[in-house]
Amino acid sequence: MGIVLTACTLIFTSIYFHKIQTAFSREGALLGLAFVTCNILFDLPMFSAGPMRMPLLHYLKEIGIAYLSMPVVSIGFGCWFAKSRRKSIKHPVAGGQ
């Protein structure tokens, strides 16, 4: 699950950040929060009363902890894009390209 989760997070974070022009760090944090919130909200019905019923603490230890990789990836992307943007502003490409 970890590899698929991280791969999907990388792909969708990359797609998202190609559309963003400013506030990369903030967007990364918000995107990570959205990823985690959506995944937990989708999982809770299945794991609280559905076919894979388990106590909340067990769910958080076994499955929920893996979701922490999502904000790590999205915040990392945001910081990298912000740093790249600052470098390109300080050192513009010759010829205006």
Image (spheres, rainbow, N blue to C red):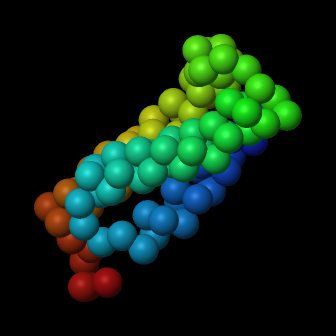
**Residue 61 falls left or right of residue 93:** right
* Image quadrant occupied by the N terminus: top right
**Residue 71 falls left or right of residue 39:** left
Residue 50 to residue 25: above or below:
above
The image shows residue 94 at horizontal and vertical percentages of 25, 77
Q: Residue at x 30, y 72 (%)?
A: 21
The image shows residue 51 at horizontal and vertical percentages of 85, 34
The residue closer to the viewer here, 49 or 36, is: 49
The image shows residue 50 at horizontal and vertical percentages of 78, 36
- Residue 96, can we see it? yes
Residue 92 to residue 86: above or below:
below
Q: Residue at x 43, y 64 (%)?
A: 17
The image shows residue 75 at horizontal and vertical percentages of 38, 43
* Image quadrant occupied by the C terminus: bottom left
How many numbered callouts? 0
Residue farthest to the front, as pictured: 49
**Residue 93 falls left or right of residue 11:** left
Q: Residue at x 57, y 33 (%)?
A: 67
Residue farthest to the left, as pictured: 90
- Residue 73, can we see it? no
The residue closer to the viewer here, 39 or 82, is: 39
- Residue 90 lies in quadrant: bottom left
Residue 91 to residue 76: above or below:
below
Residue farthest to the bottom, as pictured: 96
The residue closer to the viewer here, 20 or 65, is: 65
The residue closer to the viewer here, 72 or 44, is: 44
